[in-house]
């Protein structure tokens, strides 16, 4: 038996830390250069530590983990197993690297790598469903059956939160707005989260007078930005990716395609369990819009049910907390003895969901 596990959700925008059994993460570390709340310790780093879901700045990432474990969580990693999330598109070399770091640098007695989509499903009390994860750096639609994801039916798109921020900046530049500093970008990121919403009927609402309502936001230098229909235009790119010059499927099309690539016998269960997670699903109007679009695409006599947890930014972490609390999970850990006997490649044999 181990002490309670350390649970870490490595997101492109923020990392969440806590202990197994907690209902919410204890520590939130903003790491994206877009985030105005980025921790002061790492604010001078110009690059994103995690880009499109993949760790690119390993030295910095290790410092974030180490500082958070010791200074904020105040735990000794030699005494606690560690569950880490990894992107569904992570290369094998990244998995090996993370395994080595956890055992060699942090001396954990055991570890496990889990994909965020599977954890989100667990957090909703399900083992079968299709998870729609729209985060900061990448979007995923992943069918999962009885706890195991189906990679061949999964869709991964670079159309995510960072791209919506870029698009909003482009729309505002068309109105004559000039952005000159990184702080301006952070402000636009905040504006996106505060004012943007998804239209149920985009063209119709764009013609309506309510789309011309002004929203004002003051930049750090005192300049004021005014937004009107950009609030609708920006998140529409999730459904019409050509707006941001992308050839990726719209998020509703990606969900439908993922389900239809699965065995016919489980499609009805997948349509009935569409799970939303990730900060970019939190726009007002997103849930009824994707419901509408999937109702149109789905076969007749098939009911589409959307599950949208209120705290969607924390769903992945909560799933990790639940999973590591289960007695049956004890046998799933990659132990130090296994690591020393088989090397880091043992992670591929035991962590494959």
Image (cartoon, rainbow, N blue to C red):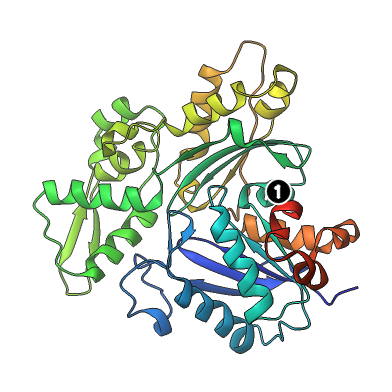
Assign a secondary structure to mark 1. loop
Residue 43, x across and y down, in percent: 36, 79
Q: Check the image and report above or below for 70 versus 296.
A: below
Quarter where residue 311 is shown = bottom right
Q: Check the image and report above or below for 255 versus 170.
A: above
For the view shown, which residue lies furthest in the left direction?
176
Residue 48, x across and y down, in percent: 38, 66
Residue 282, x across and y down, in percent: 49, 49
Where the N terminus falls, by quadrant?
bottom right
Residue pointed to by mark 1: 352
User: Would residue 204 be found to the left or right of residue 127 on screen?
Assistant: left
Does the image show residue 335? Answer: no
Q: Camera-side residue: 57 or 7?
A: 57
Q: Check the image and report above or below for 278 versus 159.
A: below
Quarter where residue 346 is shown = bottom right
Q: Camera-side residue: 27 or 112?
A: 112
Residue 14, x across and y down, in percent: 49, 66
Residue visible at 12% across and 56% down? 177
Q: Bin the neighbour count of mark 1 within 10 Å (Cα to Cα): few under 14, some 14-19, many 20 and up.
A: few
Residue visible at 49% across and 53% down? 279
């Amino acid at each position: 038996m181990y002490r309670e596990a350390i649970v870490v959700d490595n997101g492109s925008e923020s990392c969440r830390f806590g202990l197994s059994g907690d209902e919410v993460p204890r520590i939130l570390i903003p790491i994206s250069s877009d985030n105005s709340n980025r921790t002061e310790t790492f604010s001078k780093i110009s690059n994103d530590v995690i880009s499109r879901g993949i760790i690119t700045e390993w030295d910095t990432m290790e410092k974030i983990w180490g500082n958070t474990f010791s200074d904020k969580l105040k735990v000794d990693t030699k005494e606690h197993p560690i569950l880490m999330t990894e992107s569904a598109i992570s290369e094998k070399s990244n998995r090996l690297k993370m395994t080595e770091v956890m055992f060699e640098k942090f001396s954990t007695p055991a570890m496990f790598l889990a994909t965020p989509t599977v954890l989100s499903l667990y957090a909703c009390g399900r083992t079968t469903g299709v998870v729609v994860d729209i985060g900061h750096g990448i979007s995923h639609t992943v069918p999962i059956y009885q706890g195991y994801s189906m990679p061949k039916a999964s869709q991964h798109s670079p159309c995510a939160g960072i791209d919506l921020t870029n698009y909003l900046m482009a729309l505002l530049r068309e109105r004559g707005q000039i952005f000159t500093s990184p702080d301006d970008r952070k402000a636009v990121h905040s504006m996106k989260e505060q004012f943007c919403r998804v239209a149920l009927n985009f063209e119709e609402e764009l013609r309506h007078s309510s789309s011309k309502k002004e929203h004002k936001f003051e930049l750090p230098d005192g300049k004021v930005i005014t937004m009107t229909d950009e609030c609708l235009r920006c998140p529409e790119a999730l459904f019409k990716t050509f707006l941001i010059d992308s050839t990726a499927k719209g998020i509703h099309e990606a969900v439908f395609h993922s389900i239809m690539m699965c065995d016919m016998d489980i499609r009805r269960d997948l349509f009935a369990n569409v799970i939303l997670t990730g900060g970019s699903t939190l726009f007002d109007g997103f849930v009824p819009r994707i419901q509408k679009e999937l109702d149109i695409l789905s076969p007749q006599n098939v009911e589409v049910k959307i599950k949208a947890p209120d705290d969607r930014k924390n769903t992945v972490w909560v799933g990790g907390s639940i999973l590591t609390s289960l007695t049956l999970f004890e046998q799933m850990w990659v132990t130090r003895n296994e690591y020393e006997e088989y090397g880091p490649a043992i992670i591929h044999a035991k962590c494959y969901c």
